C-alpha cells in the first residue's frame, strides 16, 4: 500500500479524549471480544474528535486500548482514510479508477486543482480545501464520482463542480 | 424475471422496518425460530439451493457453512458480512444496504442461526458512511422490535450485529485480510490453510459472506431451494443476480436478472444498459471487475453472465461488475489505469506482488507515453508469469495480472503501435475522450 498522506511530526499538545469520546469508546468496547479489535472504530473516534490523527492522538488511542503505540502506528499507516496530518475543512476525494477514468475523472480532477490553485495532497491557504485522488468508491454508474468528506457527489460535471466549490467556499 | 433482491428498492421508506414488515419481512425469521426448524435444516436448504458466493469466488455458501467444526471446543462462531465492496466497477452492495438494510439483516439473522453465531459483524468500507448510518438505524429498529438481541422472539436464539467501518484498503475485502482488520491489525491476508471456517477471527471458526449472498439466503428460506434453483441457466448457476454495468453505455446502473443473463442483453437490452453511448462500437468488456481478464467484442457474443458461462470464455464473473469500453479508448491506457489501482492496493507482504504491481504500472506508463521498447511488451507477460500461480499468499496478485496479460494477448497491435509509432493507434487516451 502506498501512502501519500504521510505523517508530519508535530510537537502538538498532549491529547486526551474528551468525556463524550470516552463514552463512545466504552460503548464500542462492549461490542468486541478484545480491546485490540476496537482499534479501527476508536481511530475513527479520534479522527472525528480532532479532524486528523497526530502522533499524540495515536498514543492516546494506544493508551485507552492498552496497545503498544507502535502497533497503532502500523495500523494507522496501512489504511488510507486516516488523516495523518491536518486536512482542509472540505476533503475533496476524486475517484480516478476505471469507470470514472472512462468518464472524465482526470479532467474533473484537473479542474478542481485549477479552481482551487492547489495540487494533489495540498490544502488551500485558507485551510478550506484539500484535494486528493482516490481509488474506486463504488460510484461507477454515476461516474465521474467524488466525495467531500463523508458525502458523495455524483455524477459530476464542470457546472456541478463549480457550483459545489462556490457553495462550499461561501460557507463559513 | 420478477425482481427479488431489488423488489423493494425505489419504494417509499424502503429502509424502515415498518414498510419491511408490511411487505412480509422477517416472516422467515419468525417461521424458523418458532417452527423448530433446526440450524442443520437451514444449512441443508441453503446447500440445496447452491447459493454461490456473490463476493467474487462463487463458492457455495451452504457448503462453506458445512465446513464449520461440529465441536468448536467452547469457542464462539463468528459471521462477518463482507461489505467492503472495493473492486473497481462494483456498486451493488451499496445499493442493497442503502435502500433495503433489513433484507440484509434478516439474511444475517438466518445465517447466524444456521451456523450458531452469537455475534455477527458487518465490515463496511469506510467510504460508505451513509450506508453505515442507515444500517445502524435499521439494526436499532430490529433490536427494538425483538428481532435482534437476547432470546429473539422468545426463542433460545440470541444475536448481536455490529457495524464495523473499514478505513480505506481494498485488500480488506479478501476474507482473511478482513479478519485481520477486524482484529485491529493491518489488513494483510493470511496463509491458508487454516481456512476461516476452521480458524478465523480470534482463532475461532468464522464465516465470511458477501452482502448479496446473505440477502439471497433470506429469499431461499422464504421461498425454498426449489424456487431458487429454477431461476437461472442451470442448477449450478442459479438464483437472482445483481449486475453492475458502467463505462461507455447509455444507462449504467445495477440491474437484477436471472443468473445467466446474456452479456449482450445486459449491454443492449431496453430494460438494461440500452447500448453504447453515441452508438460507438465495443472494443473490450471487463466482465467481472478489475480482476477479470478483458473480453473482446467478438467474445461477448453468446456469453451467459454466470460463474461457469464467463469462466468458459477464459474470464470470470467475479463481483458481476461489467465495464464496457468503446472503440475510441486506448487499451494501453485502460490497462495502465487498472494497474495503477493494483499497485496502490497491494498489501506488500509478498515480494512478487509488492514489486510486480508497481513494475507493471511503470512499464505500461512507459509504453503508453510512447517511450516503450518492443521488449517491454514481452516483459509485461514475463512479469505477470512471475507473479501468478500460487507464488503469493492471496489471489490479489493473480487479479493484478489480468488486465495487462489479457490486453497484451488480445490487443497486441495497439501495444506495438505505441512502441513503433510512439503514439496511440486510436489517437486518444481514455482520459482525453471525455472532459467534464
Ligand atoms: C483481493 C480481494 C478482494 C476482495 N474483495 C471483496 C469484497 O470487496 N467484497 C466481497 O464480498 N468479497 C471480496 N472478496 C472475496 C472474499 O475473499 C470472499 O471470497 C467473500 O467475501 C466470501 O463471501 P461469498 O462466498 O458470499 O462471496 C475479495 C477477494 C480478494 C482476493
Ligand atoms: S498477494 Fe499481494 S495483496 Fe495478497 S497477501 Fe501477497 S502482497 Fe498482499
Image (spheres, coloured by chain):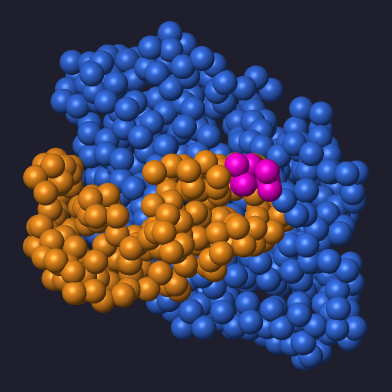
Chain colours: A orange, B blue
Residue B110: image quadrant is top left
Query: At 31% across and 40% down in the image, what residue appears?
Result: B163
Query: At 44% across and 72% down in the image, what residue appears?
Result: A4
Taking the image as shown, residue B181 lies to the left or right of residue B85, namely: left
Residue A46: image quadrant is bottom left
A108 and A128: which is toward the camera: A128
* Residue B281 to residue B404: above or below: above
Taking the image as shown, residue B26 lies to the left or right of residue B211, namely: left
Query: At 47% across and 67% down in the image, what residue appears?
Result: A122
B363 and B44: which is toward the camera: B363
Where in the figure is residue B136, as x and y percent of width and height?
31, 32
Q: Does the magenta stretch mainly form a helix, a strand or a loop?
A: helix
Where in the figure is residue B347, as x and y percent of width and height?
43, 71
Q: Quadrant of the N terminus of chain B?
A: top right
B422 and A111: which is toward the camera: A111
Taking the image as shown, residue A25 lies to the left or right of residue B141, namely: left
Residue B271: image quadrant is top right
Q: Residue B326: in sight, yes or no?
A: yes
Would residue A159 be counted in the magenta stretch?
yes
Query: What range is drawn magenta here?
Result: A156-163
B38 and B219: which is toward the camera: B219
Where in the figure is residue B90, as x and y percent of width and height?
58, 47
Would residue B111 be counted in the magenta stretch?
no
Which residue is situated farthest in the top direction here?
Answer: B22
Amino acid at each position: 500500500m502506498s501512502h501519500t498522506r504521510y505523517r508530519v511530526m508535530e510537537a502538538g499538545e498532549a491529547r486526551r479524549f474528551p468525556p463524550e469520546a470516552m463514552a463512545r469508546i466504552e460503548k464500542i468496547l462492549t461490542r468486541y471480544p478484545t480491546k485490540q479489535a476496537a482499534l479501527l472504530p476508536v481511530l475513527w473516534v479520534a479522527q472525528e474528535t480532532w479532524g486528523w490523527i497526530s502522533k499524540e492522538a495515536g498514543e492516546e488511542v494506544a493508551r485507552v486500548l492498552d496497545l503498544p503505540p507502535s502497533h497503532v502506528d502500523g495500523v494507522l499507516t496501512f489504511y488510507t482514510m486516516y488523516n495523518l496530518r491536518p486536512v482542509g475543512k472540505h476533503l475533496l476525494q476524486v475517484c480516478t479508477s476505471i469507470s470514472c477514468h472512462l468518464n472524465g475523472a482526470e479532467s474533473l480532477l484537473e479542474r478542481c486543482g485549477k479552481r482551487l490553485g492547489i495540487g494533489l495532497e495540498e490544502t488551500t491557504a485558507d485551510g478550506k480545501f484539500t484535494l486528493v485522488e482516490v481509488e474506486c468508491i463504488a460510484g461507477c454508474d454515476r461516474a465521474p464520482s467524488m466525495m467531500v468528506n463523508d458525502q458523495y457527489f455524483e455524477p459530476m460535471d464542470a457546472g456541478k463542480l463549480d457550483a459545489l466549490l462556490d457553495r462550499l467556499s461561501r460557507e463559513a | 424475471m420478477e425482481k427479488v433482491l431489488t423488489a423493494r428498492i425505489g419504494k417509499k421508506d424502503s429502509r424502515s422496518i415498518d414498510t419491511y414488515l408490511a411487505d412480509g419481512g422477517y416472516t422467515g425469521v419468525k417461521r424458523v425460530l418458532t417452527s423448530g426448524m433446526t440450524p442443520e435444516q437451514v444449512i441443508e436448504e441453503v446447500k440445496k439451493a447452491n447459493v454461490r458466493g456473490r463476493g467474487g469466488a462463487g463458492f457455495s455458501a451452504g457448503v462453506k457453512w458445512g465446513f464449520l467444526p461440529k465441536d468448536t471446543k467452547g469457542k464462539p462462531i463468528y459471521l462477518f458480512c463482507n461489505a467492503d465492496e472495493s473492486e473497481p466497477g462494483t456498486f451493488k452492495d451499496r445499493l442493497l444496504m442503502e435502500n433495503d438494510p433489513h433484507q440484509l439483516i434478516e439474511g444475517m439473522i438466518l445465517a447466524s442461526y444456521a451456523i450458531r453465531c452469537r455475534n455477527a459483524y458487518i465490515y463496511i468500507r469506510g467510504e460508505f458512511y451513509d450506508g453505515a448510518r442507515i444500517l445502524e438505524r435499521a439494526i436499532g429498529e430490529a433490536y427494538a422490535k425483538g428481532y435482534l438481541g437476547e432470546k429473539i422472539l422468545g426463542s433460545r436464539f440470541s444475536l448481536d450485529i455490529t457495524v464495523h467501518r473499514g478505513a480505506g484498503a481494498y485488500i480488506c475485502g479478501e476474507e482473511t485480510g478482513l479478519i485481520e482488520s477486524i482484529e485491529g491489525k493491518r489488513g494483510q491476508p493470511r496463509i491458508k490453510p487454516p481456512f476461516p471456517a476452521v480458524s478465523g477471527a480470534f482463532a475461532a471458526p468464522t464465516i465470511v459472506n458477501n452482502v448479496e449472498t446473505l440477502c439471497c439466503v433470506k429469499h431461499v428460506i422464504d421461498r425454498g431451494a426449489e424456487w431458487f434453483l429454477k431461476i437461472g441457466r442451470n442448477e449450478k448457476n442459479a438464483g437472482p443476480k445483481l449486475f453492475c454495468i458502467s463505462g461507455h453505455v447509455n444507462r449504467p446502473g445495477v440491474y437484477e436478472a436471472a443468473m445467466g443473463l446474456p452479456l449482450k442483453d445486459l449491454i443492449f437490452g431496453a430494460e438494461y444498459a440500452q447500448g453504447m453511448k453515441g452508438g460507438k462500437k465495443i472494443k473490450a468488456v471487463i466482465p467481472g471487475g478489475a480482476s477479470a481478464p478483458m473480453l473482446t467484442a467478438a467474445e461477448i457474443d453468446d456469453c451467459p453472465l454466470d460463474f461457469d458461462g464467463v469462466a468458459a470464455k477464459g474470464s470470470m464473473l467475479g463481483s458481476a461488475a461489467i465495464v464496457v469500453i468503446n472503440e475510441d479508448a486506448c487499451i494501453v491506457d485502460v490497462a495502465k489505469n487498472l494497474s495503477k489501482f493494483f499497485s496502490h492496493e497491494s498489501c506488500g507482504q509478498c515480494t512478487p506482488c509488492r514489486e510486480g504491481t508497481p513494475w507493471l504500472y511503470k512499464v505500461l506508463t512507459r509504453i503508453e507515453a510512447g517511450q516503450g521498447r518492443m521488449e517491454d511488451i514481452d516483459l509485461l507477460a514475463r512479469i505477470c508469469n512471475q507473479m501468478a500461480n500460487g507464488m503469493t499468499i492471496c489471489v490479489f496478485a493473480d487479479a493484478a495480472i489480468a488486465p495487462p496479460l489479457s490486453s497484451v494477448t488480445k490487443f497486441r497491435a495497439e501495444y506495438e503501435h505505441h512502441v513503433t509509432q510512439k503514439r496511440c493507434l486510436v489517437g486518444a487516451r481514455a482520459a482525453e475522450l471525455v472532459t467534464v
